[in-house]
DNA sequence: GCCAACGTTGGC
DNA sequence: GCCAACGTTGGC
């Protein structure tokens, strides 16, 4: 069971947009980076991921669930790119900000901190548990 | 809006 | 296969 973190700019596609999709969820399309794509290819149905708002907010706002493994990205004909499907599972009671993450012992090694440009990244089980607690879950 | 970090592209 | 030029991301 692996854990993940995916980023999106909330003014383009934010947590409320995913919530609005309900149980059917949404394709995480538009990723055009090999490392990010490879992480999506490693995802299994039922695995959980944080939804991070980049640029605006800069905080983790909720938990998503993988509901389909990686399949061709419908927004391009380029066969190199594919993506998973996700649904919103549970909103954080309060967002966990990037500044807070950077200031929390145990989280300084997160990919989010070390490689801020990677939009789909793994999260360790320890990081997952700690952040869930910080988010009020 | 700026710019550092990083990834990609393309000439050689 | 190297590397300079360029484009993009995302924090500040």
Image (cartoon, coloured by chain):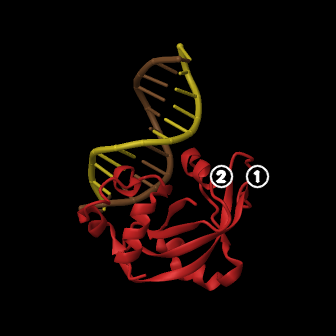
Chain colours: A red, B yellow, C brown
- Image quadrant containing the C terminus of chain A: bottom left
Instruction: Left or right? Give the position of A30 relative to C4.
Output: right
Q: Which residue is mark 1?
A: A77
Q: Position of residue A73 (x, y in %)?
A: 71, 58
Task: Assign a secondary structure to mark 2.
Answer: helix
Binning the other alpha carbons within 10 Å of mark 2 as few (below 14), some (14 to 19) or many (20 upward) gives some
- Image quadrant containing the N terminus of chain A: bottom right
Q: Position of residue A4 (x, y in %)?
A: 52, 61
Q: Chain of mark 1?
A: A
Residue at 63 percent across and 52 percent down: it is: A42
Residue at 60 percent across and 71 percent down: it is: A65
Tell me which label, 2 or 1, sits earlier in the chain. Answer: 2
Q: Which residue is mark 2?
A: A41
Report the mark closest to the observer, 2 or 1.
2
Task: Assign a secondary structure to mark 1.
Answer: loop
Q: Chain of mark 2?
A: A
- Is residue A81 at all visible to an observer of this figure? yes
Are labels 2 and 1 assigned to the same chain? yes
């Amino acid at each position: 069971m692996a854990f993940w973190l995916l980023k999106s700019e909330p003014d383009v596609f934010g947590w409320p947009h995913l919530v609005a999709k309900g149980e059917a969820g949404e394709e995480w399309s538009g990723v055009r980076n090999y490392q990010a794509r490879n992480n999506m290819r490693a995802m299994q149905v039922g695995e959980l991921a944080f939804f991070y708002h980049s640029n605006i907010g800069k905080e983790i706002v909720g938990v998503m669930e993988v509901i389909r493994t990686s399949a061709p990205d419908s927004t391009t004909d380029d066969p190199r790119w594919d993506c998973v499907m996700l649904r919103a599972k549970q909103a954080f009671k309060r967002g966990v900000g990037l500044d807070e993450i950077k200031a929390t012992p145990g989280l300084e090694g997160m990919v989010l901190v070390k490689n801020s440009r990677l939009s789909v990244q793994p999260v360790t089980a320890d990081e997952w548990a700690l952040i869930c607690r910080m988010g009020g879950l």
